[in-house]
Amino acid sequence: MSTKTLIGVLLAGITGVLIFLFVHLSGGSGGGPIKLGSSKAEACTKGARDCLPEVNYVDTQGKAYTPKSLTGQVVIVNFWGTFCPPCKKEIPDLSAAYDKYKDKGLVILGVMSDDPSDSELLNFASDFQMTYPVVRSSSDIQVAFSYPDKLPTTFVFSRGGKQVYSKVGALHADEIKQIIEPLLAEKP
């Protein structure tokens, strides 16, 4: 085999491996389709790895979201930051979903990774049409979600508290609807 052929084969192989790693490790493929087996939400075993973590979330208005208060709700936990362009892009779609479905059992908690002042956050929320609760990140929340290091990162939990979807990267309106409508149709 000639040197040029060998180099070509090696470059093709390396390119293939890089493409594979990029697609599978970037999180762009999301958490895959949601598979719901029945019309009743499957309950999560307390403390199991794929359950909504047993932490308290307190939003910037002082409202507490406890594990008990989230029971029976479809919960989206979205890690984001004010500096993050993809986060800014998904916020209006998350807000529209929250406004449409909050009375049907949807809770969206936006866990903020940075630390703007209250007035900066208020201006940001107004500029980006953010209507769902914002939670300042804490060590308990970070540990519970294994320190998400890419933003945005989103986790979706069924009414039974079971994680059914996760994604690194921005969610879009159609994707949000496709994920949450079947979950909201489940009985708690």
Image (tube, rainbow, N blue to C red):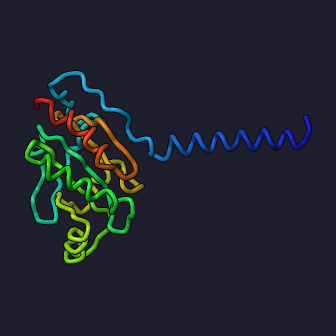
Place of residue 58 in the rendered image (x, y in percent of width and height, measured from the top left): 15, 59
Residue 26 relative to residue 119: left or right: right
The quarter of the rendered structure image containing the N terminus is: top right
Residue at x 11% of width, y 42% of height: 105
Residue sitting farthest toward the top: 38
Please determine whether, in this image, residue 50 is positioned above or below residue 169: above
Place of residue 11 in the rendered image (x, y in percent of width and height, measured from the top left): 75, 44
Residue 93 relative to residue 184: left or right: right
Residue 54 is drawn in which quadrant? top left
Residue 2 is drawn in which quadrant? top right
Place of residue 51 in the rendered image (x, y in percent of width and height, measured from the top left): 25, 37
Please determine whether, in this image, residue 116 is positioned above or below residue 17: below
Q: Which one is in front, 98 or 187?
A: 98
Q: Which one is in front, 66 or 74?
A: 74
Place of residue 29 in the rendered image (x, y in percent of width and height, measured from the top left): 44, 41
Residue 38 is drawn in which quadrant? top left
Residue at x 18% of width, y 55% of height: 57
Residue 142 relative to residue 14: left or right: left
Please determine whether, in this image, residue 44 is positioned above or below residue 17: above
Residue sitting farthest toward the front: 174
The quarter of the rendered structure image containing the C terminus is: top left
